[in-house]
Structures are given as structure tokens and as C-alpha cells.
């Protein structure tokens, strides 16, 4: 039965991925966003031998949008004119086995061994699932040792997989490090338990080696050590007494060379890239502990962790309540690290950590919530009534993950009005332009007729303006219908002299029923231009229907 549950869970995740993503699309490559930086070490070292990452420009036009709009700026220029990859290299080490397997698969099948062809893209996806489910397996081993039933363990796992923002980064976005950090913390917890059980110094040695890998993957995750006393409490062991009785520094020193071998990797890579041993690769990005966004980080509509992932609020409150019932010390061991960690993470210059679903940086610490919740609901036998809360929270989470991915809610930009206006909505918001009071209308033209673009007619009839001077905004209003998530259709504005070209990819805002929308383009200051507006299907067989198009030209 246990094997069947594991199999069914993995199958559900893979089937959802299969029906949700198209990895052949230039928009949906797994090696994307931040992953381009984390991953770039591997092709740079093993394929291109290129410390400046000059190969990236060609890769962008080959596998991603040719206009470079999906490029990730992970290369930071240094004072000596060199460039450094701002990402830490620990994740590349975790990618490494899958990179080599992908290279072999590409070579055997005659696909380009360039680091970004389909075998390499799929290798990153497989790596995500391997590490995540390995993390769950280690947590299950830990909890079974603590006499937690398999049923309770899987209730906790279901809460994490389907009830948190983990779902978003398993299905919709493979560009970040947090699923891998989830595995590292799970491994950390399992090693601590082995150390407690055996009292063997080899496990403490393995622990500091692992901590070195954690540090070069995401330095702030060194804060995982703050939870060690809580792990000891779960294992019914007094932390301070154990350390006093069992810590032998003479034996631990044996493991220091292995730790140094890991910690020296970033300086070696900095030297290779910039000819300097020590570099702050993030340039001007950093922490401001005097201006923390702690409350917003936890509760804001914009990107609040507990607002966007209410399941975690439920799990934390339940664990906190039960741990304080056990003892004041156990409760403090659980809550104080969370206060410190959330304060530090919310002090980062970009406390939202970009777009995406909720506060992704907290996924790294979910293993401690899993073991706390599982242990205490097993111990206190209060499991049945929790289903009344868990099931609605899972359904809400799955919907909100869907909303963020399909841009129904704006990850990292949502206001309270946006949130409630689109609460429980399944459709992408149609773009809408608000005309400002200081905008001055220069002219407008309308094409009030039905038009279809398809394999035979790739363009709608163009709307050409008169010669206009000092246009600063062009606003296009239209009613349009097409297949949902059609990637080829775009709205284009160009100028008669060929110096201006702007386009808007409709992407997932289109549906089979007609929708009204408005889109604006910023126009650089210039004079005496004729502007041409039309819809283009990228010379594909993509079909759309427009009922009308109105173009307005503004200055201010």
C-alpha cells in the first residue's frame, strides 16, 4: 500500500505537468529565469569553456524568444571589466548528475549537445522531481522512526504538495532553487536524527559537510541550524546535554578538509571569471535590516507568505499550539527560528523575490513544518477534525497557483482590490489601459469590421495613422477571440521609417469567446511619423478573429 501511494502521488504530479506545460514552446523552457544563472556554470565549464558566458546570446535566440525579452541578467560586470555569474554554484553541483545524463542522451539521439536542447531541459525537470521526492522520502524515514503512522505522514505530505506554493514550483516554474533546498534541509534533519541515534561523530562530520553545500547553494540557509534544538526535542533528547556529552572536536577536525573543498568552490569560480578570489557577485543588491518588510513578507496581498499560502499558517499554528502544550522550551525552539528567518529574508532589497506564487524562499524550511505538524497531530490524536480545514485550503491553493501562473492574479504585484475582484476566478484578466488625465488625444482611427488571420492570411489589414508629431502613447482597443494560450499571435505597432517596432504577445489572454481589451505602447520622442498597427500570427497557421480595432495616439 505504501508503494502504491508513493506511485499515485508521483503519477498525479507528472500527469498534471504533462497537461500543463509545453516544453517545446519558447515560453515554457524549464531552464529559465533564475535557473539560467544557477545552471550556466555547467555548459560554461564543460561545453563552451567560456568564463564570460558569451554563448548565452546565441542560446537565447536559438531556444528562447528571438527578441531577447526572456533573457536573464545573471552576469554582473566587475570594476576590472570582467563578468561574474551572480548566482552561487551549489545548485549547479546538484544539477551535475542530470547534466551529464542529459549530455549522454543528447549524444546518443543525435540532438545538439549544447546544454540547452530538449534532453537538458527535461533533465532539469527530472532533477526537480528526484530531489523533491527524495526529500519527502527522508522526512518519512525520520517520522517513522518517531512512531508517526504512515497515514499521518501522508496527510502532511499532501498538505505540502497540494496545499502550498510547492505545487507552483513543481508544475509551473522550475527556475528557482527552493525545491532543491527543501531536499537539503530534509537531508539535514535526517542526518541530525542519525547523529542522535548512534552518537557517532561521523554523522556530525557529515552534517558540517552538508552545511557547507547548503551555504554555497543559498548562504542565508545557514539559518537552518537554528532548528537543531527543535529537532532534538522531537527526538526526545536534550540538546545542550547531548552536545556537552557527545561533541568531540578532535574527531570532527577530520572532516574539515572536505568542508574546505566545498567552500573553496565559489572563490575558484570567481577567480576563473574575474581573476579575483573574492567577489560580491550581487553588486548593489543586499539586505537592509533597519528597513525590514517583515509584516508585508508574511501578510500582504502583494506577496504575503501566509496570505498566499494559508495552509502553512494552519500547519504552523497547529504545531505551535501543540508544541507549547508540550513545554515552553519546545514551543520557543519552534517559533523563534521562524521569527529570525522571516525577518532576515524580508530584509532583502527585493522582499517579494520577484513574481511567482507566494514567498518561495520559505519552501526551503517546509521540512521542519512537516515533521512538527506530523509529530504533534500523531501525539495528540487530533487528526480527524483537521480535514474540515485541510480540504478547502488545498482547493484554494490549487486555484491560486493556477491564477498566478495564468496571470489572473499578479504574482508580486497584487493589490487587495485585485485579489478580491478576481477571487476564485478561472480566467486570465484581459489587459486594460487607464487613460490618464494629462494625456492629450492627437488622433484616433477605427477599423470596424470582422477579420480573420490564419494560414492563408497572416496579417489583419493595417491601420495607418496620418503623419503625427510628438506621439508618446499609442493605445489600441479591440475585441478579439482565438484559441487560449496561443503563443504566435501578437499586436504590432511600427513606424514608416523602420526605426520603431513594438509588439505585444497575446499569449494566454485570448479565449474562444470574444473579449474586449486595450493595450498601450510607449513611443520614444520623435517627430513626423506614420504609425502602422496590425495583428500578426507569426506566419503560422494560428487563427484569430477580431471584431474591431481602434487606435488612439496621445501626447502629454
Image: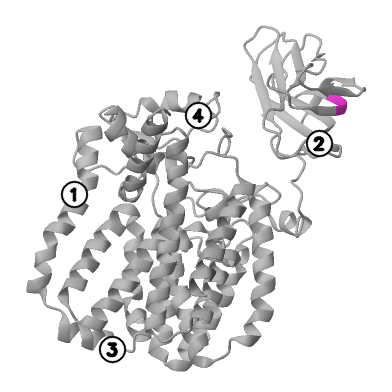
Q: Nearer the viewer, mark 2 or mark 4?
A: 4
Q: Quadrant of the C terminus?
A: top right
Across and down, in percent, residue 315 comes to 55, 76
Judging by the rendered image, the residue that carries numbered circle 1 is: 264
Measured Cα–Cα span from mark 1 to mark 2:
54 Å
**Dot 3 and dot 1 residues touching (CB under 8 Å):** no
453 lies left or right of 55: right
Across and down, in percent, residue 529 comes to 72, 10
Q: Is residue 84 above or below residue 340?
A: above
| Bounds of the magenta segment | 546-550
Classify mark 4: helix, strand or loop. Answer: helix
At horizontal 26% and vertical 29% (from top left) the residue drawn is: 49
Q: Nearer the viewer, mark 2 or mark 3?
A: 3
**Dot 1 and dot 2 residues touching (CB under 8 Å):** no
Q: Considering depth in this image, is 54 or 43 the residue closer to the camera? A: 43
Judging by the rendered image, the residue that carries numbered circle 2 is: 517
Q: Considering depth in this image, is 296 or 441 the residue closer to the camera? A: 296
At horizontal 45% and vertical 32% (from top left) the residue drawn is: 117
N-term-proximal mark, 2 vs 3: 3
Residue that protrudes farthest toward the left in the picture: 250
Neighbor class of circle 4 (other Cα within 10 Å; few <14, some 14-19, many 20+) is some
Q: Can you see residue 178?
A: no
Neighbor class of circle 1 (other Cα within 10 Å; few <14, some 14-19, many 20+) is few
Across and down, in percent, residue 445 comes to 87, 19
412 lies left or right of 218: right
Judging by the rendered image, the residue that carries numbered circle 4 is: 63
N-term-proximal mark, 3 vs 4: 4
Residue 221 picture quarter: bottom left
At horizontal 38% and vertical 70% (from top left) the residue drawn is: 138
The color scheme shown is one colour
Amino acid at each position: 500500500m505504501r508503494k502504491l501511494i508513493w506511485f499515485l502521488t508521483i503519477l498525479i504530479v507528472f500527469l498534471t505537468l504533462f497537461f500543463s506545460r509545453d516544453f517545446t514552446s519558447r515560453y515554457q523552457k524549464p531552464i529559465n529565469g533564475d535557473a539560467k544563472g544557477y545552471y550556466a556554470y555547467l555548459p560554461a565549464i564543460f561545453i563552451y569553456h567560456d568564463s564570460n558566458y558569451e554563448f548565452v546570446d546565441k542560446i537565447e535566440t536559438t531556444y528562447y524568444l528571438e527578441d531577447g525579452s526572456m533573457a536573464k541578467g545573471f552576469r554582473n560586470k566587475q570594476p576590472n571589466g570582467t563578468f561574474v555569474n551572480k548566482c552561487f554554484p551549489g545548485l549547479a553541483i546538484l544539477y551535475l548528475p542530470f547534466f551529464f545524463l542529459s549530455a549522454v542522451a543528447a549524444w546518443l539521439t543525435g540532438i545538439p549537445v549544447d546544454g540547452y536542447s530538449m534532453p537538458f531541459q527535461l533533465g532539469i525537470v527530472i532533477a526537480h522531481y528526484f530531489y523533491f521526492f527524495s526529500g519527502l522520502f527522508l522526512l518519512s524515514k525520520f517520522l517513522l522512526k518517531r512512531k508517526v503512522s504512515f497515514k499521518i505522514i501522508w496527510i502532511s505530505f499532501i498538505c505540502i504538495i497540494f496545499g502550498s506554493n510547492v505545487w507552483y514550483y513543481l508544475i509551473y516554474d522550475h527556475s528557482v532553487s527552493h525545491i532543491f533546498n527543501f531536499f537539503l534541509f530534509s537531508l539535514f534533519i535526517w542526518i541530525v536524527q542519525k547523529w542522535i541515534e548512534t552518537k557517532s561523530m561521523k554523522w556530525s562530520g557529515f552534517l558540517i559537510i552538508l552545511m557547507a553545500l547548503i551555504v554555497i547553494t543559498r548562504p542565508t540557509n545557514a539559518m537552518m541550524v537554528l532548528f537543531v534544538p527543535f529537532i532534538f526535542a522531537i527526538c526526545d533528547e536534550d540538546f545542550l546535554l547531548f552536545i556537552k556529552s557527545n561533541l568531540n572536536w578532535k574527531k570532527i577536525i577530520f572532516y574539515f578538509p572536505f568542508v574546505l573543498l566545498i567552500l573553496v568552490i565559489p572563490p575558484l569560480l570567481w577567480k576563473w571569471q574575474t581573476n579575483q578570489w573574492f567577489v560580491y557577485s550581487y553588486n548593489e543588491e543586499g539586505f537592509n535590516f533597519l528597513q525590514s518588510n517583515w509584516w508585508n513578507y508574511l501578510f500582504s496581498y502583494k506577496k504575503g507568505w501566509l496570505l498566499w499560502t494559508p495552509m502553512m499558517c494552519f500547519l504552523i499554528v497547529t504545531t505551535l499550539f501543540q508544541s507549547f502544550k508540550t513545554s515552553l522550551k519546545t514551543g520557543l525552539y519552534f517559533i523563534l527560528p521562524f521569527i529570525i528567518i522571516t525577518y532576515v529574508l524580508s530584509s532583502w532589497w527585493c522582499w517579494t523575490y520577484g513574481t511567482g506564487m507566494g514567498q518561495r524562499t520559505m519552501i526551503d524550511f517546509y521540512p521542519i513544518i512537516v515533521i512538527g505538524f506530523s509529530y504533534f497531530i500523531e501525539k495528540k490524536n487530533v487528526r480527524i477534525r483537521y480535514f474540515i480545514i485541510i480540504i478547502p485550503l488545498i482547493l484554494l491553493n490549487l486555484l491560486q497557483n493556477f491564477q498566478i501562473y495564468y496571470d489572473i492574479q499578479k504574482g508580486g504585484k497584487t493589490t487587495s482590490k485585485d485579489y478580491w475582484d478576481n477571487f476564485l476566478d478561472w480566467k486570465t484578466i484581459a489587459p486594460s489601459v487607464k487613460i490618464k488625465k494629462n494625456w492629450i488625444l492627437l488622433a484616433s482611427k477605427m477599423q470596424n469590421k470582422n477579420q480573420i488571420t490564419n494560414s492563408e492570411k497572416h496579417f489583419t489589414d493595417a491601420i495607418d495613422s496620418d503623419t503625427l508629431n510628438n506621439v508618446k502613447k499609442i493605445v489600441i482597443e479591440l475585441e478579439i477571440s482565438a484559441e487560449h494560450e496561443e503563443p504566435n499571435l501578437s499586436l504590432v505597432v511600427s513606424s514608416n521609417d523602420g526605426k520603431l517596432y513594438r509588439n505585444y504577445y497575446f499569449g494566454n489572454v485570448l479565449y474562444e469567446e470574444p473579449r474586449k481589451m486595450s493595450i498601450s505602447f510607449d513611443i520614444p520622442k520623435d517627430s513626423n511619423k506614420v504609425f502602422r498597427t496590425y495583428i500578426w500570427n507569426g506566419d503560422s497557421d494560428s487563427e484569430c478573429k477580431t471584431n474591431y480595432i481602434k487606435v488612439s495616439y496621445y501626447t502629454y
